[in-house]
Amino acid sequence: MTKSYVASSLPPDHLAELTRLMIEEVKEAAVFFMDANGFIETWNGAAEEMKEYTAEDAIGSHLSLLYTEEDRARGWPEHNLDEARKHGFFREERWRMRKSGSLFWARILLTALRNDAGDIIGFSKITLDLTEHKLLEDCEKEKEETRRVLSAANAGKWTWHPDTGQVDICRNFLALLGHVDDDTSISLAQWLGFIHPAQQAAVAREFDMARAGQREGSMHLEMLMRQKTGTYRWFAAHADWHRDAAGAQPLLHGVNIDIQELKTVSEERQQAIDMLKAEDVRKNEFLAMLAHELRNPLAPISAGAELLKMARGDEDRVRQTSQIISRQVSHMTNLIDDLLDVSRVTRGLAELENKLLDMRHVVADAVEQANPLIHMKRHHLALHMPPDNAMVSGDEKRLVQVVANLLNNAAKYTPQGGNIVLTIDVQAVHVVLDIRDNGIGMAPELVNRVFDLFTQAERTSDRSSGGLGVGLALVKSLVELHGGTVAAASDGIGKGSRFTVVLPRMHEQLDVASLADDHRHTAAQFLKILVVDDNVDAAEMLSMLLEASGHQVITENGPRQALERASLVRPDVFLLDIGLPEMDGLELAKRLRAEATTAGAVLIAVTGYGQEADKKKAFAAGFDHYLTKPVDITRLNSMLTEISAARQA
């Protein structure tokens, strides 16, 4: 350790005089001496200025005079003297109290003074006022804490100087907009440039009113602000006036908070509310419609019952009245059947009796059902049928119902003497049914929801078209049960409508051998396939197709049952729906890959999800192939042929 010393070429009395002058003249440093017990013996001008005690106040007083009441109560003055006695020196930074009671942040250097014998003969103390440094340091800490809080809250600060028009922006705010390296001091015009053009004028008016003193108190705004990428996000701005000093020009201090997610949630919530309101309106319209439709046949039934009481012996009148009652009861029965039917189908309770059908025969039966209404309204119906078979797999009664509903819909909403055209187009893997009319057409908003339950076009007050608005909802559900799709289109009001049904095409089942030859199968190439789909009819239809190709097919409608069956039969190929209950197809695929008995099987996804992200998830879960519904039968057969050939090799 270096020995303490003062080197000097001056005589001792000259050195002592210089030391006295230094202590006396030094600025911004309180310097004084104490005796060995801590009583003050000297005092300089800087000490008086800093601590506000005069020499008369200080000399003869104990060091504790300069400490706060709290520090004196805990014995801090004696503690500091003891530390200096033990170690020769004590240093600290803390708040000290002036005579007036005000506080200042002090750096204290307390030194024990020893004679040549090593005995303590007193203490020297130097105090520096670092209040400004302390406040600056605290300010920087506060700024950093504020920055962290703003960052966590996706917010940023700004300050507007009305006298210069300058806006100071914090880095956080610039980062939120992607302008990390931009200038933090810009003009108001530049700041307004971040705002969506449609809102700039309104926000500028707020600032103009604030500058003119017409806007008092806080400012609250919500606005779209442009990011560097060109996209816009919602921000909420809150600003208050503040003066940095008495008499200074007031400044507008603001905080902008990113509320994009809140806005999105709010908009989605409003959309949901609007949808519920629309559903409620449709429900009320339906109930009113139902009451009207049921009340209509009740009137002639009631009148007929009264006539029967009075018409005893008049056989012709009794017969005529009975026929009227019978027709009206039949009408009521059909209405109720429609309601029950749409309820069963939309809840997935309808059972299909699938078989190979020629859509030309289906259309013929449907035309027979729709003809009374078509003839009554004097429409011209043109049928364009293909020369060859248009084979599909489905429930004959239900497919006739689909076509009849579409024909009745066209007849109902086409003015008398209109034209209806029905076309069947047989494509490679689909049979397409197209029905067009030159009727009242549909507005774009109706096209988007025409298949929703209880949706109808505008009708006149006499409600002459009738119906409950369930026919097209039933069509959509039945077509989807058959693995197909249905779409509506219209060029607008008064320009007619078009409905297109697309169903998977089936090749006529001549015999298994010829089908096998077409796809180059041999008995040794047939595969054991497990089809898993919670849609019973869809699973059954696909199974029929695969069995017609000679494959051994097992079907399951639940994922857990499929796991149990798979461990027993060990299929070569799995055709799995993705949207399964309890456990989706992705999880089922992972579990099949984890089982030793099924790890080597080929997994094919058969699903209605067709996005690229869905395919990536499927392949990541362990699927080998991915097919979207309705399944391209030719592609599936080709895929199975390749799988079979690979296993033979």
Image (cartoon, helix red, strand yellow):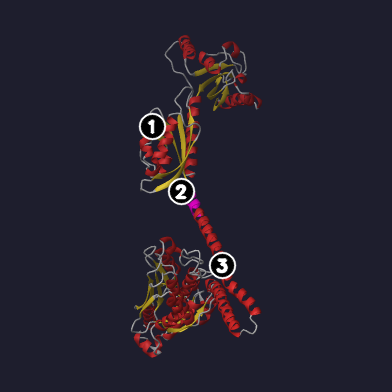
Foreground pick, 152 / 158: 158
* 345 over 461 or under it: above or below: below
Q: Pinpoint residue 56: horizontal percent, then vertical percent.
A: 59, 10
Q: Amino acid at mark 2?
A: Gln
| Callout 3 touching callout 1 (CB < 8 Å) | no
Residue position marked by numbered label 3 in the rendering: 292
Residue position marked by numbered label 1 in the rendering: 166
- The magenta stretch is 259-268
Foreground pick, 281 / 86: 281
Q: Amino acid at mark 3?
A: His
Q: Pinpoint residue 428: horizontal percent, then vertical percent.
A: 34, 78
> Which quadrant holds the C terminus?
bottom left
Residue position marked by numbered label 2 in the rendering: 260
Q: Give the mark nearest the N terminus, 3 or 1.
A: 1
Q: Residues within 10 Å of mark 3 (few under 14, many from 20)?
A: some
For the point 51% across and 53% down, the residue is: 270
Give the CA separation, mark 1 to mark 2: 27 Å
Q: Give the mark nearest the N terminus, 2 or 3.
A: 2
